[in-house]
Image: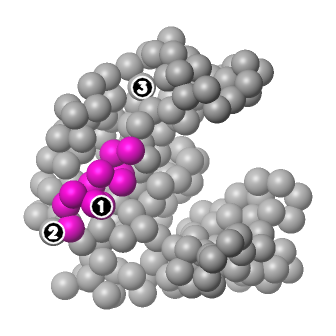
Amino acid sequence: MKGKLLIFSAPSGSGKSTIVQWLMKEHPELKLYFSISATSRAPRGTEQNGVEYFFLTPEEFRQRIKNDEFLEYEEVYQDRFYGTLKAQVERQLEAGQNVVFDVDVKGGVNIKKFYGEKALSLFIQPPSVEELRRRLVGRATDSAEAIEQRLAKAEYEMTFASQFDHIVVNDDLEKAKQETLQLIAHFLNE
């Protein structure tokens, strides 16, 4: 049976990655697998081509953009691209995998437009910008300036929430996990 697509987007610090990791670890029956992205950066540590990423040169990446081979892509820095190859997603779907996209809001909206009803898009939202500030400060991983930049970006990203199929407000992590699980289980069983 062919797999389905699950799109997760959220502002930084919303708990999206925590929820996605929990689903993948604690619910193997859902057959969730990350989409394998392409990047033009060099492999780090033990990363292998075709496992963590498909490693392309900036020239190869640009050629594939010209060939319309990406669902979505972004040039994060000059010559540093990240993107999702259509053919890779199709291979995973054909293998019966339910493909998980952990992407920025624009990527999430674009993937949903491309796949329509075959994809479920979820926006994980913090209860408020002030709560998000508290979480980011609590992480103690960013400077005050970086936190302000993340918050400004988060406010912008939250304007995209209505373009997703469902908004899960993460004001209580356990509740947000269960709500996300129910939405996904229902979608996969349709």
Q: Residues within 10 Å of mark 3 (few under 14, many from 20)?
A: many
- Residue drawn at the location 13% of the way across and 55% of the way down: 186
Dot 2: element: helix
Please tell me in which quadrant of the rendered image residue 152 appears: top right
Magenta stretch, residue numbers = 18-28
Dot 3: element: loop
Could you tell me how far apart the alpha carbons at marks 2 and 1 are, in whole angstroms?
A: 9 Å
Please tell me in which quadrant of the rendered image residue 101 appears: bottom left
Above or below: residue 186 compared with residue 18 = below
Q: Point out residue 149 in the picture as x, y percentages from the top left corner.
A: 72, 26
Q: Which residue is mark 1?
A: 24
Foreground mark, 2 or 3? Answer: 2
Q: At label 2, which amino acid type do we have?
A: Glu
Along the viewing direction, whichever of 76 and 41 lies nearer the viewer: 41
Q: At label 1, which amino acid type do we have?
A: Met
Magenta stretch: includes residue 26: yes
Q: Point out residue 18 in the picture as x, y percentages from the top left corner.
A: 38, 44
Quadrant location, the C terminus: bottom left
Q: Which residue is mark 2?
A: 29
Q: Which residue is mark 3?
A: 126
Say whether disc 1 or disc 3 marks the residue closer to the N-terminus: 1
- Residue drawn at the location 75% of the way across and 64% of the way down: 81
Dot 1: element: helix
Could you tell me how far apart the alpha carbons at marks 2 and 3 are, in whole angstroms?
A: 28 Å
